[in-house]
Amino acid sequence: MHNPFTIEKKKIDIRLWVVVRSFSPLELYIHKYSYSRMATNDFDCHETNFMDWTKHFGLKDRDAGVYNLGFLQDKLIDEFNNAQEDGWNKFEKRVHDIVKDVFKAAVLYKPEIHSEKSRACYGIDIIVDEDLNPFIMECTFQPEFAYICELFPDFLSQVTRCMMYGEEDNFYKLY
C-alpha cells in the first residue's frame, strides 16, 4: 500500500477479534477492543525500501515473530478522529461491513463449514489507508492470545462465553 495511514510516521496494522457461533445460520460477533502493531521505522514508499520489513510490518524481530505493539484502542480512536471527523466510528462501521462480507463469502463458497454447532475465534489483521479505509491483510483461525490476555486477563472467558452462550459483553453482534 503506497498511502497507508500512519501514526508518528509509522505504518500500523490493527488486530481484531471475531467469534463465530454458527455458520448455518451465520452468527457472528466482533470484540469491541482492538490494538495496533507498529512498524519499527518510519514509513517510506520509495522503491528501494520495498524489501525493508522494518518500514512496512509491525515486527520487532521477524524471525521470532515478535511484534512492536503500537497503540491501544483509546489512542487509535484519538488518532482516527484527529485525521477525520468521526473517523473512528466511520472506520469501525466499514470494518464491520467488510468482516460480515468475508464470513458471508465463506458460507457461500465453503458449504462444508455449514453447521449450527460451529464455534471459532479468528484474529483479523487490518491495514488502513490514509482515507481510513480498512483492508484485510490476514484472517487467522485460533490466533495467538498472549498479548490480548495480558491486557484483559478475562479475554478468553469473554470469548468462550460469547462462543458457547452468545453473551455479548464486550462484543458487537454482526449477525
Image (cartoon, rainbow, N blue to C red):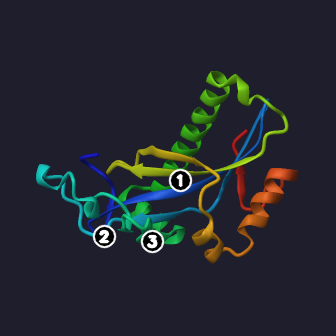
Residue 65: x %, y % from top left: 44, 65
Asked which secondary structure carries label 2, the reply is: loop
Residue 15: x %, y % from top left: 52, 58
Q: Earlier in the sequence, mark 1 or mark 3?
A: 3
Q: Amino acid at mark 3?
A: Leu
With 43 as the anchor, is 116 left or right in this view? right
Point out which mark residue 12 bears: none
Q: How far apart, in angstroms, are the residues tagged by discs 2 and 1?
A: 27 Å
Can I make out residue 86 in this image?
Answer: no
The C terminus lies in quadrant? top right
Q: Earlier in the sequence, mark 2 or mark 1?
A: 2
Residue drawn at (83%, 55%) of the image: 167
Q: Is residue 140 above or below residue 152?
A: above
Tell me the mark number nearer the camera, choosing from 2 and 1: 2
Q: Look at the numbered discs 1 and 3 and tell me whether their residues touch, using CB distance below 8 Å.
A: no
Q: Amino acid at mark 1?
A: Asn
Residue drawn at (34%, 59%) of the image: 57
**Residue identified by numbered label 2:** 40
Looking at this view, name the residue that lies furthest to the front: 63
Which quadrant of the structure image shows residue 82? bottom left
Q: How far apart, in angstroms, are the residues tagged by discs 3 and 2?
A: 10 Å
**Residue identified by numbered label 3:** 69
Tell me the mark number nearer the camera, choosing from 1 and 3: 3
Local crowd size for mark 1, using a 10 Å CA cut-off: few (<14), some (14–19), many (≥20): few
Nearer-the-camera pick, 175 or 77: 175
**Residue identified by numbered label 1:** 89
